[in-house]
Image: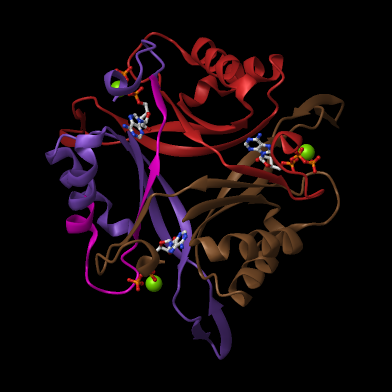
Chain colours: A red, B brown, C purple
Amino acid sequence: MKLITAIIRPERLPEVKNALFRIGVTGLSVHGIRGHGGEPEIIEYVRGQRIVVDFTEKVALRIAVSEPFVEPTITAILTAARTGNVGDGKIFVQPLERVIRIRTGEENEAAL
Amino acid sequence: MKLITAIIRPERLPEVKNALFRIGVTGLSVHGIRGHGGEPEIIEYVRGQRIVVDFTEKVALRIAVSEPFVEPTITAILTAARTGNVGDGKIFVQPLERVIRIRTGEENEAAL
Amino acid sequence: MKLITAIIRPERLPEVKNALFRIGVTGLSVHGIRGHGGEPEIIEYVRGQRIVVDFTEKVALRIAVSEPFVEPTITAILTAARTGNVGDGKIFVQPLERVIRIRTGEENEAAL
Ligand SMILES: Nc1ncnc2c1ncn2[C@@H]1O[C@H](COP(=O)(O)OP(=O)(O)OP(=O)(O)O)[C@@H](O)[C@H]1O
Ligand SMILES: Nc1ncnc2c1ncn2[C@@H]1O[C@H](COP(=O)(O)OP(=O)(O)OP(=O)(O)O)[C@@H](O)[C@H]1O
Ligand SMILES: Nc1ncnc2c1ncn2[C@@H]1O[C@H](COP(=O)(O)OP(=O)(O)OP(=O)(O)O)[C@@H](O)[C@H]1O
Ligand SMILES: [Mg+2]
Ligand SMILES: [Mg+2]
Ligand SMILES: [Mg+2]
């Protein structure tokens, strides 16, 4: 099992969610984050005032999947989240040792 | 050491926190998320308007524990978070390689 | 590659961000959390009313780095986040198996 975290543009969440549902991935968690992605500082001038724009709003999706779903999940996110412009986001894959469904106590594959 | 993430119903947070404190687990982080947990789409009608309810509000708890605390922590969460209805949430267990207390620089077991 | 999560005081975020930028770490995600860090319950009295302060506001930083950046990143956070008072926060280091840049499809070191 893997825990896949995707940082995406907020406006891409509906497309990404639909792409995941289409491949049968329907368990996921979402929360807003602010991020910085390697770009040089953005300087904005608001009424003559120099402002350093540090962070942009992004959405973090966390998806626990069994091995056969890892590649389809990544492909679905890549396709649905990409605009081709800088700032499209990143995908992180981490090991996941154990999953438990609270209602039933089922574990791992049976809990996904 | 493990990092335990529990996605629970927001209204269960006080019970879960108390259950954790009772077994001596007092270090934890909490944030709100929106989640989807495998249920078919919920359709609501608001003044004749069809609305697809995508996400429900949940709370994510993150708890770093040493090995002897893994099972008690999971048991405490299962007992305190369970209502028996769909949507009770999930527990994820991930490897945790290193923990550092910022104030002292202490590491791992000494930092938990 | 590692995923470093730092829980810090919100007012330390600018210093920590600057310390990270100075060592060349510019990819990161930030979100607000509420935390509890092992302290005994804080009891406050508001107009004679006993109030148990459960959680304090913290900021969670998540930073994916390649191996050579692990130690510099930890050192930068420790130095910039520390006040010496209880509640300075914690650093967690987790394994990270794969990173993908959504715009280009680049993976791992090339994606960081
Ligand atoms: N190394 C990292 N660690 C943690 N989060 C990151 C990292 N890099 C990027 N992020 C998160 O991903 C978001 C989007 O990053 P972004 O797409 O700008 O990455 P990038 O590598 O700069 O790619 P691009 O060149 O396409 O902009 C950031 O706002 C941040 O939230
Ligand atoms: N595979 C998953 N990956 C990430 N988060 C998940 C996953 N499955 C569930 N979650 C999170 O847990 C929350 C609760 O899920 P839920 O309890 O509905 O799981 P379930 O497997 O559908 O169990 P039940 O049949 O009891 O409803 C979701 O809203 C979501 O935030
Ligand atoms: N074991 C843990 N698991 C998850 N999060 C934790 C844990 N311990 C602390 N945290 C998070 O870190 C924040 C700060 O913790 P804190 O600095 O009080 O740690 P501490 O171990 O009590 O150190 P100190 O003695 O310096 O107060 C907490 O509010 C919580 O969000
Ligand atoms: Mg970028
Ligand atoms: Mg469900
Ligand atoms: Mg403390």
- Residue extending farthest front: B68
- Quadrant containing the C terminus of chain B is bottom left
Number of numbered discs overlaid on the protein picture: 0
- Residue plotted at (56% across, 65% down): B69
User: Vertical placement of C38 versus B84: above or below?
Assistant: below
- Residue plotted at (24% across, 42% down): C70
- Would you say B82 lies left or right of A90 here? right
- Residue plotted at (58% across, 60% down): B70
Instruction: Looking at the picture, tell me which residue is in the foreground, C44 or A24.
Output: A24
- Would you say C47 lies left or right of C103 here? right
Taking the image as four quarters, which one is ligand 1 found in?
top left
Is A105 within the magenta?
no
- Would you say C79 lies left or right of B103 here? left
- Residue extending farthest left: C22
Q: Estimate the x, y position of residue B100 in percent, counting from the top left.
A: 31, 59
| Residue A53 visible | no
Q: Magenta segment, which residues? A: C77-100
